[in-house]
Image (cartoon, grey):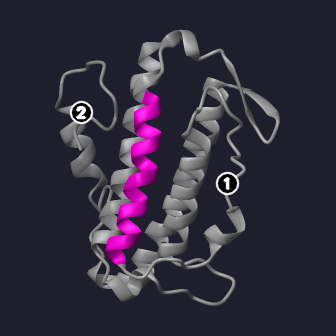
Amino acid sequence: MNSYLESIKKQFLYYKMLGEKAMEQLTEEQLFWQYNEESNSIAILVNHIAGNMLSRFTDFLTTDGEKGWRNRDSEFTNSFLNKTEMMNYWNKGWECLLTTLEQLSEKDLEKIIYIRNDGHTVVEAINRQLAHYPYHIGQMVFIAKILKNEAWNTLSIARNKSGDYNNRKFSQEKSKRHYTDDL
């Protein structure tokens, strides 16, 4: 199961990188852009993702993942004054998550933790968040692509370049590696 812990760390870092590469392509004003009142800006999504990370992964093995101090509803409003403040909060959430993952051992994986009094094994709780964060990071990437249009720098295999990518991958020897290893 140590391979599970290593894999999920790499996957979380991959999605962190995608979010950051999308945000890097935007102006500060674009980070706060909302299509309409009901939609989220990237800044709002950052506020929610980091707020969720801090709640879920603070005292992960010993307290409920929905902390009493968390105000989830306020995460869906813009509370940042600028990009620097937003990025500091983004990094605070990721630091909490990644530090917790580093401290876990194989023997922790079957322990039961709670989120709103619903019991999860540690594996289930991590998998829950590994689905949740990429869902929102995908929204961030989508917003960034809309705003950048033709100036967008792709974060994955560029259009009409799948053949080149496959040729490069198949020219390598078969080996056990994580798909994020050669990014």
Q: Main secondary structure of the magenta part?
A: helix
20 relative to 105 in the view: left or right: left
In the rendered image, residue 89, in percent from the top left (x then y), is placed at 42, 61
Residue hosting label 1: 69
Q: Please name the residue shown 30% across and 19% down the image.
A: 176
Q: Secondary structure at mark 1?
A: loop
Foreground residue among 4 and 70: 70
Q: Is residue 108 visible?
A: yes
The 10 Å Cα crowd at callout 2, few under 14, some 14 to 19, many 20 or more, is few
Question: What residue did someone put label 2 on?
Answer: 170
Estimate how packed mark 1 is, as few (under 14), some (14 to 19) or many (20 or more) residues with alpha carbons within 10 Å.
few
The quadrant holding residue 173 is top left
In the figure, 87 relative to 32: above or below?
A: above
Q: Quadrant of the C terminus?
A: top left
N-term-proximal mark, 1 vs 2: 1
The three-letter code of the residue at mark 2 reads: Phe
Q: Residue at x 55, y 86 (%)?
A: 34
> Mark 1 belongs to which amino acid?
Trp
Determine whether, in the image, residue 40 is placed left or right of residue 11.
right
Task: Pinpoint residue 159: horizontal percent, then vertical percent.
Answer: 32, 65
The spot of residue 155 in percent (x, y) is 32, 60
Q: Residue at x 53, y 77 (%)?
A: 79
